[in-house]
Image: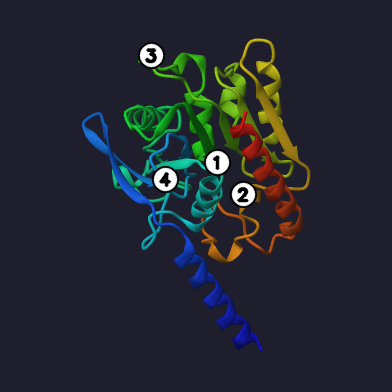
Amino acid sequence: MRLLFTVLLAMLLMSAARAAPAPQAIEIPLGSGTLHAQLYKPDGDGPFPTVIALHGCGGLGGHSDPVLPRYRDWSEQLLKAGNAVLWPDSYGSRELGPQCRVKEVRVKARRERVADIAAARGWLMKQPWVARDRVSLIGWANGASALLWAVRPQNSGRDGAPDFRAAIAFYPDCRISAGLGWSTRVPTLLLIGGKDDISSPPACRQMVDGAYGRSALARIVVYPGAYHDFDLANLPLHAPATSPDVATPDRGHVGTDNEARADSQKQVAEWLAR
């Protein structure tokens, strides 16, 4: 019986993998180098609303997959809603692997990753299929931390092109930003689990509350009982257990995280449709 279940599950996963749209590899000029990215784009000429999506510290892809299943799943959802999705590969572009537990971080959220966001935005502004006034940001964990830096008023682009339409941050590390008096120039939504044991929900609450009155719209949704990576709850079999960017199915919170994941999908759709 267990063997039959395993075979059926493998067939289901293989079928899902075949059905998933293949991304297009993109090269974006970045200083003296090249920023590699993966692009999911709806069929047709557009113009399409577009999301710059920012991976966590585990990186964008694996050995045989340019985009990890957790990010491919979100790409498919965003595509179904009519969005193009551009994934800058901040680590692979610099020939680095996952940066979750390294002692010396060579790609910083507030520096190199903000530069990657600016380069990705600049490239998108030149594409005829992009709705230039509907480019948004979504980030996870370390990518969400980079997003918080990118939307600060100090990092506003000066090229005359439309600014980001919206920003959505999944469980960023808010501790530094909270202490610096963070604010945002674009509507920003933060989603985090109340029991996140990697990021700090209290720091994120403090950061958002402190921005009221001197910032564009900032909103935080805290999911009681949900942990870090709650949006991965439906995909535990795809997750490498060594990365803090993924949830494991044996922590006793999959049901709670699934509820948070479902609500976060609704929140994302509504925030991007503003």
Residue located beneath label 1 in the image: 141
Q: Which mark is residue 41?
A: 4
Disc 1 to disc 2, how far (Cα)?
8 Å
Q: Is residue 168 above or below residue 22?
A: above
Q: Where is residue 134 shown, x and y percent of the image?
A: 49, 28
Q: Where is residue 221 shown, x and y percent of the image?
A: 72, 35
Q: Which mark is residue 273?
A: none
Residue 162 visible to an observer of this rendering: yes
Q: Are marks 1 and 2 in contact (CB under 8 Å)?
A: yes
Badge 1 element? loop
Kind of residue at disc 3: Gly
Badge 4 element? loop
Q: Residue at coordinates 56% horizontally, 27% vertically from top-left?
A: 166
Residue located beneath label 2 in the image: 229
Q: Nearer the viewer, mark 2 or mark 3?
A: 3
Q: Where is residue 123 shown, x and y percent of the image?
A: 32, 31
Residue located beneath label 3 in the image: 160
Kind of residue at disc 1: Ala
Please identify the quadrant where the C terminus is shown.
Answer: top right
